[in-house]
Amino acid sequence: MPPRKPIRDAGGAPPGKLAPGMRLSRELVAESQRERLAGAMLVLVDAQGFAGTSLADLIAQAHVPRDAFYRHYGSMEVCFQSAYNSHFAWGAGQVVAAFNAPELEQDPERAAVALAALSEFAREWPAGARVCAIDVLTVSHGALEARAQELAGVRALLDAALGVDGPHAERAPLLTVAVLGGMRWAAYVHLRKRPRRELPRLGEELYEWIRSYSDAGFAGEGGSPGGEERAIGAGSKQANVDGAGVAVGDVPEASAAGSRGEPRDGEAPGELDFPGDEPRERILRAVISLAASSDGEDCTYPKIAAAAGVSHDTFYKHFSSRQEAQLAACQGVHERLIAAARRASAAATDWPTGVRDGLGAYLAEAARDPQATRVMVLGSLSLGEPGRKFLERRARALKQLLRPALAAAPSLPDAGAEMLVGAILEVLYEHALERRIEQLPALQGQLAEIVCVPLLGARHVLARPAEVAARRLASDRA
């Protein structure tokens, strides 16, 4: 049930200190302190990240004594979780109320109304919206209940906009994750870079994106009637199934080797990225190994130095802190993935094939060392503000990878590129969270389709998996 009120006042700021001289009950004073602490927590995490926020910062921002903080929450993590849950519940309540309005029952436009309500909520307090969109990922990966609610909400939006049995139905599990990521990242970028008065337009663009996965996008039997038929990957020397389209499970030839999800024989996590025997490479391999084995809990600089076989002085010669070493290790993993994607994409003869092959190489490289990829995706987020900036660099690299595709679709909404990038990031994040990174290569076809459909619209026909399997069987017999 949503809280009685959001953690802010009517002007969009967190609640302020009570006026002096007011004689209030102990219960009202305690409630005011809790609200001020929760509101201050969201403001500070938005400004400087959770890892960069101290208890001293929090109680000064909230004008609450230290002993009152411990009485109400006991730890920074509990305070953040309470603040996030309250703000998330309030926003979800507004969206659900708009979506379930009696006059909109069975109306596909209620998805647009719900997205408009979401945009309005973000407009009222952008700091809280940014925390709910991305910053929560930098604090805890354990908010699975809220994530489940988000995924259920996105699936309801898809079903309302496209029909419960619409052409998206068979792809719904992955599409739901991708759309959640697209909404999350597009909202975050907008709230960071654009005026909040433009948020209503973002809601409209999100709805247009969802609607692109209608009959005009996801082709059913017989393709898309009335449109120019074009297959994703047609005309490419690397296109599978004679250029018939994207098929679930396709992996580009250049990336097929080593795509089963394990490092090569004799290799430990991180050796794909830092193969040398110099002290710096040994340190970075140790960071990946320790972070992978304990989710970062044992990744302290003394343990890193011991695992790398270097002295403390040698460690500090290369890195000023454990956080800097971990960020450098994550950057190395990211560079391997994006380099493979660029090579595969550059070898394609058209941009749809470039998207497919680039994503295939990216996913295959991610699966070659699941532990290192998981550290890159999740471990970097635990670094606070530097981790958030690293996430932005990863997003920029994916956007650059999609640049030829984006240039070929000038009618894509302003936020369209961020939606597609967010979709890719979210798929990787979910598989890291659920320890299923080795399964990523099998998603190449579906993910390429999700990315290409909004760009191609009604101009392509997607080869269905059954049709692909039949053609392959006939080819093998021949």
Image (tube, helix red, strand yellow):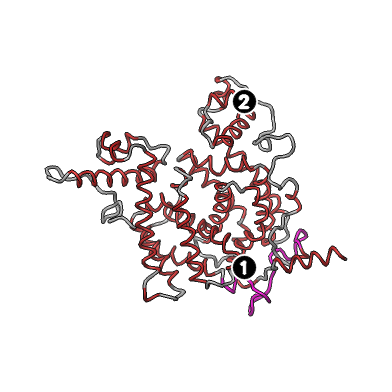
Quadrant of the rendered structure where residue 331 is?
A: top right
**Crowd rating for badge 1 (residues with CA inside 10 Å; few <14, some 14–19, many 20+):** many
Q: Are there few (<14), some (14-19), or many (20+) residues within 10 Å of tag 2?
A: many
Magenta-colored span: 214-240
Number of callouts: 2
- Say which residue label 2 marks: 308
In-front residue for pair 163/358: 163
Q: Amino acid at mark 2?
A: Ala
Tell me if residue 10 comes above or below residue 213 in the rendering.
above
Q: Which mark is residue 202?
A: none
Q: What element does badge 2 sit on?
A: helix
Residue 377 x %, y %: 56, 44
Q: Is residue 230 magenta?
A: yes
Q: Nearer the viewer, residue 120 or 178?
A: 178
* Residue beneath the point at 62% across and 22% down: 309
Label 1 residue SS: helix
Amino acid marked by disc 1: Leu
Which quarter of the rendered picture does the N terminus lie within?
bottom left
* Residue 435 included in the magenta stretch of the image: no
Residue 297 at x, y = what percent? Answer: 51, 33
In the image, residue 72 lies at what x, y percent? 29, 40
The residue where tag 1 is placed is 456
Which dot, 2 or 1, sits closer to the camera?
Answer: 2
Instruction: Label the magenta part by its dominant secondary structure.
Output: loop
Quadrant in the rendering for residue 41: top left
Q: Quadrant of the C terminus?
A: bottom right
Dot 2 and dot 1 residues touching (CB under 8 Å): no
Give the residue at x 53% y 26%. 301
**Which of marks 1 and 2 precedes in the sequence?**
2
Residue 197 place in picture, x, y as percent: 36, 61
